[in-house]
Each structure stands twice: as C-alpha cells, then as structure tokens.
Amino acid sequence: MASLPPISTKLAHYPSLQGQRVFITGGGTGIGAAMVEAFAQQGAQVAFVDFAETESLALVDKIAAAGHVKPWFCQCDVRDVPALQKAVADATTALGDFSTLINNVARDDRHTLESVTPEYWEERMAVNQRPAFFAIQAIVPGMKRLGGGSIINFGSTGWQTKGSTYPCYAIAKSAVNGLTRGLAGSLGQDRIRVNTISPGWVMTERQIKMWLNEEGEKDIQRNQCLPDKLQPSDVARMALFLASDDGAMCTAQEFKVDAGWN
C-alpha cells in the first residue's frame, strides 16, 4: 500500500457555506469529526450531537482555538428519539434554522445471524436506521422556512460488497437509499435536496484499532482502484460539495467515496 499522500493546499473553498448552519449527528469522532471541522473551516456554524462527550468537547475547543466559529455541541444518545428531537430544537433556538443536515451517526458492530435477538435487533436499528428519519422530521420545517436545504444521509458500501460480519448494520444501511429516494420527490418541491454518501473502508481511529490487520491491508490493495488509504477528510469533502450551492441540482442520488472498491 502506498504511503498517505500529502494533504493538498489547493482544496475547494465554498463561499455559499460561509455563515450557513449545519447539523451533524455523530460528529464527535471519525468521519463525523472530520465533517464538523471541514464545515467550520468553510465558515459555517456547526451544531452536532454525539454520545462521546470528552472527544466532542476536545473537538469544539480545537476548532475554536484555530479561530473558527465555535461549534454548538450537545451530548445525546440518538437511540432516545425525544432526546434527539430536543437537541435539534435547542440548537435551532440557539443558532437558528439549519440549511444542512448530515445523518452520519452509526456503529458497525460485528455480529452473526445466530446471535441476534429481538432486543439486539431493535438496538441496532435504533442507532443505525431510526435517528436519520426523526432528525429529518425535526429539521425540515426550518429548511422550509429558509426556502431550501441539503439533507445528506450516510450509507455504506459494505452491504453492497456483501460484507457478512454485520447483517443488522447491512440491513440498516441498505435502507438509507430508500430513505433518500423516498423523500427527495416530496421535499424537492421546497428546494430541499436529499442525497446519500456511501463511504468505503475509511481509516478512522476505530477502524484501524479494531479491524485493520494484515488481511485487511491485502483487501485494500486487492479491491481499491486507488492505492491510498481512504481518510475521513476525503468523505468530508464530498459532504461540503453536496451542502454547497455548487450541488444545487443534485438530489435523490448516491455518491460513493470508496477509492473505486465497489
């Protein structure tokens, strides 16, 4: 595997994101944290929720220390729908209506078909599927008041490549395209765009610690078209485009950021 290339100093700046309000679920670590930082660097006002309070507060301080607008953060267990709804309401009261919603929160915990109980099933859907719908429901009235917006739902290429170690996660993530396409038509009448980003195997701290081994390195070499490991910032840049005015006519689509794996 080739070494990580240097970060380009010529990445896009989106003037339309300056001053925009962005709400992100699961923004404290991994891809979510990369998106919080990327939007803040564009001059957006970011609000995010996450269960990981320590990491999230550290991210808030890091962004503020860099001279960007300090993100709004609320610790929230998204399995608790009323708590998620309250977080959206509180963020809206504090900052105003949101033009962008990013449904990022998820956990790809490994499990087998035989081990799944009804209780485990419900808990997995409560993390990986249900929050996206209710976050959209809570955010959309504000987008209508603004005259439009961008909803970005996070899918996964894992189920599309027939990953077999997380059937509940695969089911939840395969439903994301249905959520996107099922809402794009009706919400489009209010100029609200709905798209899916499906990342490949992104090298977050969690992925590296838990699952990147020698066999995983070989899988990357064998399956990716591009030689470099996929980074959270690579996915964040796609989210920036879809949230910006540059993506104004993109809706009901799935955008894959996977170095050509799928």
Image (spheres, helix red, strand yellow):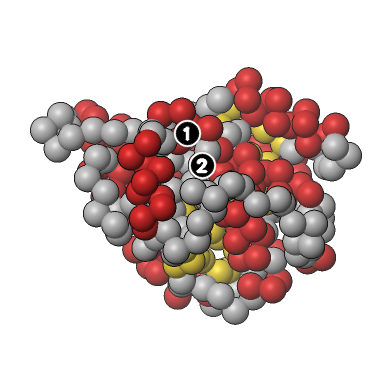
Q: Amino acid at mark 1?
A: Ile
Give x and y (percent) for residue 42: 78, 54
Residue in front for this viewpoint, 221 or 28:
221
Residue reaching furthest to the right: 67
Residue occupying image coordinates x 63% and y 72% = 247
Label drawn at residue 203 = 2
Are the residues flagged by discs 2 and 1 in contact, CB closer than 8 Å? Answer: yes
Residue in front for this viewpoint, 138 or 252:
252
Q: Quick check: can you spot residue 6?
A: yes
Label drawn at residue 219 = none
Residue occupying image coordinates x 71% and y 71% = 245
- Occupied quadrant, residue 174: bottom left
Give x and y (percent) for residue 117: 16, 30
Residue in front for this viewpoint, 206 or 19:
206
Q: Tell me the SS state at disc 2.
A: loop
Task: Rate crowding at label 2 as few (under 14), some (14 to 19) or many (20 or more) other CA atoms within 10 Å.
Answer: some
The answer to whether 54 is drawn above or below residue 101 in the figure is: above
The answer to whether 176 is drawn above or below residue 193 in the figure is: above
**258 left or right, relative to 19:** left
Q: Amino acid at mark 2?
A: Met
Residue reaching furthest to the left: 114
